[in-house]
Amino acid sequence: MKVLVINAGSSSLKYQLIDMTTNVLMAKGQCERIGIDGGIFKHSANGKEDYTRNVNMENHAKAIELVIEALLDSEHGVISSMSEISAVGHRVLHGGEKFSGSVFIDDKVMEAIEECIELGPLHNPHNLTGIRACAKVMQGVPQVAVFDTGFHATMPKVAFMYALPYEYYEKYHIRRYGFHGTSHRYVSAKAAKFLGKDINNLKIVTCHLGNGSSIAAVKNGKCVDTSMGLTPLEGLMMGTRCGSIDPAIIPLMMEKENLSTREIDDIMNKKSGVLGITGVSSDFRDVEALWDEGNERAGLALQMFCYQITKYIGSYAAAMGGIDVLVFTAGIGENNGRLRKIICENLAFMGIILDDEKNKQRGKECDLSAENATVKTVLIPTNEELTIAIDTVEVLENLKK
Ligand code: ADP
């Protein structure tokens, strides 16, 4: 059984074709600048030469057509007929309170995802476009939606409520939802398996540190708290997002700089975080290189990032009444031993102690803890696409029952 995983954005679409009998990634790629001149299509497949095409894609349906064409291509493709694709799994950002798990997409589900647009206005419309494009180009192929918010649905009310007038929750569903759910779910389960322990008996803190970063507290296999909120803007400072700030700053900045709601939103989402502090780059590799050259603001940005993570780990240990396992994942978590070390430096009092030699490892499942650590710190590479594909198969199998 082969599953096509789709992650559709406003002007981009990423895809992976995964063989679910072997869990092998057969092909992947992305369509960039959909609906804009200068479109780029990148494709790579197992055992085939990578290729990039400059081709305009007027909409997402055209992009999906190109994906299918590439998968079928005699030179670069990996399948001989579209009928080999058994299902499509879509990453959908916001499931609101309507979805706690992955679902087969029918008209009712489409409507419900549409109703969640007010909660995820930057992503849900594009996720829907991706689903409609696949329905058009791949008629009859079953589609499944996997929500970024899904894993966090188990958070208790005490963790997900904001102390605003209660009616805003009732009227507008304003509450914490959390994101990167597929990643937190995948790495927490993998970490337990890797350590040979039962997840139902573990207190785990998972740190997904990439361009977008979030932390989750996973107690006995269930998410009990997470750093992102109603939107992915809350929590840690990130590549370009400010993370949590005093909410009173927003009206103040709007008045002082004469900003509209859209403009302030843009500043907080795209011009803040590591980019905002350094004024140069949002990429942690660039910022680290600048720090090494003596750029103080680069050093400040990275130290602020690590400091915030340290505080979250401490607070989630308190929230769960302890911590057994600390997990690092995503671009930074998997590759940056230096930042991992800074994050863990002040956590020795909780038994989180890294082994400097082991901490040099990157990009593979491994234990980073020192002999005398009482908490296991592990590196688990995330795989959101595989999780989406596994869910897709599971949802379709359950439908047959
Ligand atoms: P996204 O949230 O876009 O999926 P990633 O998880 O790929 O982001 O993380 C992007 C960040 O991770 C970048 O800031 C980058 O500096 C860092 N990163 C990614 N790969 C590496 C690597 N091989 N070595 C060091 N840093 C990396």
Image (cartoon, rainbow, N blue to C red):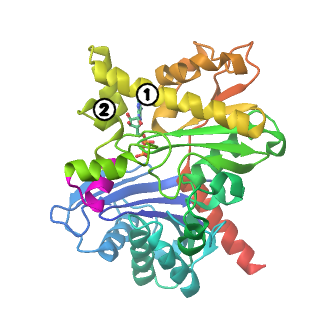
Q: Main secondary structure of the magenta part?
A: helix
Amino acid tagged 2: Ile
Does the magenta segment cover residue 251? Answer: no
Image: 176 above or below 278: below
Rendering coords of residue 273 (x, y %): 36, 39
Residue drawn at point x = 38 percent, y = 51 percent: 48
Which mark identifies residue 277? 2
- As drawn, is 75 to the left or to the right of 105? left
Rendering coords of residue 222 (x, y %): 74, 51
Residue drawn at point x = 68 percent, y = 21 percent: 352
Rendering coords of residue 232 (x, y %): 47, 53
Magenta region, residue range? 258-268
Q: Earlier in the sequence, mark 1 or mark 2?
A: 2
Give neighbour class at mark 1: few <14, some 14-19, many 20+ (Cα, 10 Å).
Answer: some
Which mark identifies residue 304? 1
Which quadrant does the C terminus fall into?
bottom right
Residue drawn at point x = 57 percent, y = 60 percent: 175
The quadrant holding residue 202 is: top right
**Cβ atoms under marks 1 and 2 closer than 8 Å:** yes
> Mark 1 to mark 2: distance in Å?
10 Å
